[in-house]
């Protein structure tokens, strides 16, 4: 019996020693730069609460801008929303477009080509919204129309939409610039959101279908007013604005709670915005890139 007790005590001591080594080893791993770099990338286990399609209206020839925006939005995500970003333009008109855009579609699957001639104020926005119910494979809770000179921060955008209604919603930056009343005038074209039921209404109603020529973002507000739609309206100021110094009272300094910055026409403006929001902060977890930060 005494011998058995000694053997049992030895096994217990060995088990406790191995447990100590295991805990110490894992504590060391948790402090390692490698794990710190991987941990922030792990997806949330909770399912997304809603879905959002962001359609960036652009032109077929703007290849460089699309590739850049793919980088900007490809490294962003939101734990509360499933967000798809697509590039929207009208029919292709040049032989090279048919080859180069086809390559983009095969590689990225993020291009929607509308059946229209390229334009700014002759119905492109109407064609975009009215076409979606017929051409999309899935239905989204929200659809956004955005310009290609706006930087949208996907996580803050999703958090701002999270508590809002999923029906009859019109969200954006209300014009005029000084206004805080989203029920007067319309939302700026920098980027505004409609709930899916309003997208379907645009596709079905004669009100927008018979009024497609003119300043298109202003027309959207007019359609909704005429149809007695969008009873839920939200203007997200000051989180949405034009780049500092570019557009009078629509502009202000960059702020941490930003959702969208508009009128980024030059690369130095893009660089300033991306630097301000520390978009490349994850590089600090990779020693080989520290010398460029």
Image (spheres, helix red, strand yellow):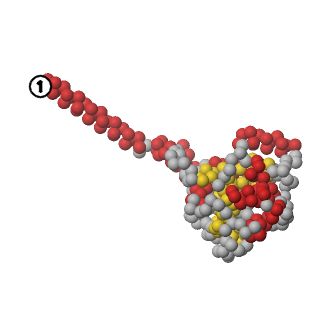
Give the image quarter of residue 203. Answer: bottom right
Q: Residue at x 74, y 39 (%)?
A: 106
Residue 158 locus on image (x, y percent): 59, 57
Q: Nearer the viewer, residue 164 or 26?
A: 164
Residue 192 percent across, percent down from the top left: 69, 62
- 14 is higher (above) or lower (below) than 247: above
Asked if residue 8 shows in the view, the reply is yes
| Residue identified by numbered label 1 | 2
Query: Among all residues in the image, which is located at the extreme left?
Result: 2
Along the line of sight, which residue is nearer the eye, 93 or 46? 46
| Residue under the image location 71 percent in, 60 percent down | 198
Residue beneath the point at 82% across and 40% down: 99
Work out whether residue 177 can be spotted.
Answer: no
Q: Is residue 64 left or right of residue 214?
A: left
Using residue 60 as the reference point, say whether residue 272 is left or right of it. left
The kind of secondary structure element at disc 1 is helix
- Nearest the eye: 278 or 259: 259
Spot occupied by residue 264 in the image (x, y as percentages of width and height): 70, 61
């Amino acid at each position: 019996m005494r011998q058995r007790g000694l053997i049992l005590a030895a096994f217990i001591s060995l088990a406790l020693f191995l447990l100590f080594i295991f805990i110490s080893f894992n504590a060391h791993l948790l402090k390692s730069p490698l794990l710190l770099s991987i941990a922030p990338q792990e997806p949330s286990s909770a399912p997304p609460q809603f879905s959002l399609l962001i359609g960036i209206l652009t032109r077929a020839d703007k290849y460089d801008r699309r590739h850049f925006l793919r980088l900007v939005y490809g490294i962003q995500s939101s734990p509360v929303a499933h967000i798809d970003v697509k590039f929207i333009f009208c029919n292709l008109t040049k032989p090279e477009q048919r080859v180069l855009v086809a390559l983009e579609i095969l590689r990225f699957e993020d291009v929607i080509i509308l059946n229209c001639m390229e334009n700014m104020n002759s119905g492109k926005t109407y064609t975009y919204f009215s076409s979606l119910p017929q051409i999309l494979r899935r239905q989204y809770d929200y659809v956004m129309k955005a310009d290609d000179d706006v930087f949208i921060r996907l996580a803050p955008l999703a958090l701002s939409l999270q508590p809002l209604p999923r029906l009859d919603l019109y969200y954006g930056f209300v014009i005029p610039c000084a206004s805080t009343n989203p029920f007067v005038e319309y939302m700026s074209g920098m980027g505004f959101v409609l709930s899916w039921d309003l997208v379907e209404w645009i596709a079905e109603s004669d009100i927008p279908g018979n009024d497609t020529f003119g300043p298109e973002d202003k027309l959207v507000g007019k359609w909704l007013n005429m149809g007695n739609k969008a009873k839920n309206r939200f203007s997200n100021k000051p989180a949405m604005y034009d780049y500092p110094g570019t557009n009078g009272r629509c502009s202000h300094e960059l702020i941490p709670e930003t959702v969208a910055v508009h009128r980024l026409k030059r690369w130095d403006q893009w660089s300033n915005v991306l630097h301000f929001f520390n978009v490349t902060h994850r590089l600090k977890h990779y020693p080989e890139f520290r010398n460029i930060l």
